[in-house]
Image (cartoon, helix red, strand yellow):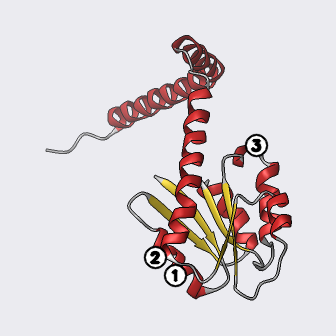
Amino acid sequence: MNRILLADDSPQSLRLAEHILATGQNEVVSVTDGATALHRLADFDPDLLVCDVYLPTRNAFELTRFIRAQPRHKRVRVVFAAGPADRFDEQDARNAGADAIIRKPFEATPLLTMVEPLLEAAAAERTQQDDERPMVERDTVRAAVALALESSMSVLIGEVTDRVLLALSQQRVRRTVVREAPNPVE
């Protein structure tokens, strides 16, 4: 499943983009400012960021530079979304690391045509990253478990010993109380 993070301070733009992008293949999370977008980058781990150019707190340029500087987010594709009246230099956007630029209001066909290849590329990189992770061998896991058990064994032995001694002392007290109880008069 593809993960898309939408960042736009316009509720209408967010609803429209969510409606277009929220297909069976896409999970979409929306935020309304750049600071929240930064937090969601970490916990949502998107494949694609569609970001309003002039987003509050952190704009699209700042977010993209952050993403490009983080090895963890190297596969994230970024689309700058600009309103019809927004003036910005598209070359500056590309220099910041934008993969694509789209004008609002969003239209379904152009938006989907733009994001599909970006999502495919991000998915391919995600798969490659997963394939490049070294496989953990059984012996490595076994050694780690043995070390963990060895380091905690003395604490565990001490706790079990204390509980056994406590149980034995409580049993001894019960026997003493039973022996000293007066015989009922018949």
| Tag 3 secondary structure | helix
Q: Which mark is residue 19?
A: 2
The x, y position of residue 184, in whole percent, is 21, 44
Q: Is residue 36 above or below residue 84?
A: above
| Tag 1 secondary structure | helix
Q: Earlier in the sequence, mark 1 or mark 3?
A: 1
The C terminus lies in quadrant: top left
Q: Measuring 33% from the left and 35% from the top, which residue is drawn there?
A: 178
Q: Residues within 10 Å of mark 3 (few under 14, many from 20)?
A: few
Q: Is residue 155 above or below residue 7?
A: above
Residue 132 is drawn in which quadrant? top right
The residue wearing badge 3 is: 71
C-alpha separation, residue under disc 2 versus residue under disc 3: 31 Å
Q: Pick the residue in front: 170 or 26.
A: 26
Q: Measuring 48% from the left and 26% from the top, which residue is drawn there?
A: 164
| Tag 2 secondary structure | helix
Q: Which mark is residue 15?
A: 1
Q: Measuring 66% from the left and 55% from the top, which residue is drawn there?
A: 77
C-alpha separation, residue under disc 2 versus residue under disc 1: 6 Å
Q: Residues within 10 Å of mark 2 (few under 14, many from 20)?
A: few
C-alpha separation, residue under disc 1 versus residue under disc 3: 31 Å
Tell me if label 2 and label 1 are in contact, CB under 8 Å.
Answer: yes
Residue 51 is drawn in which quadrant? bottom right
Q: Pick the residue in front: 110 or 178.
A: 110
Q: Amino acid at mark 1?
A: Arg
Q: Pick the residue in front: 115 or 154.
A: 115
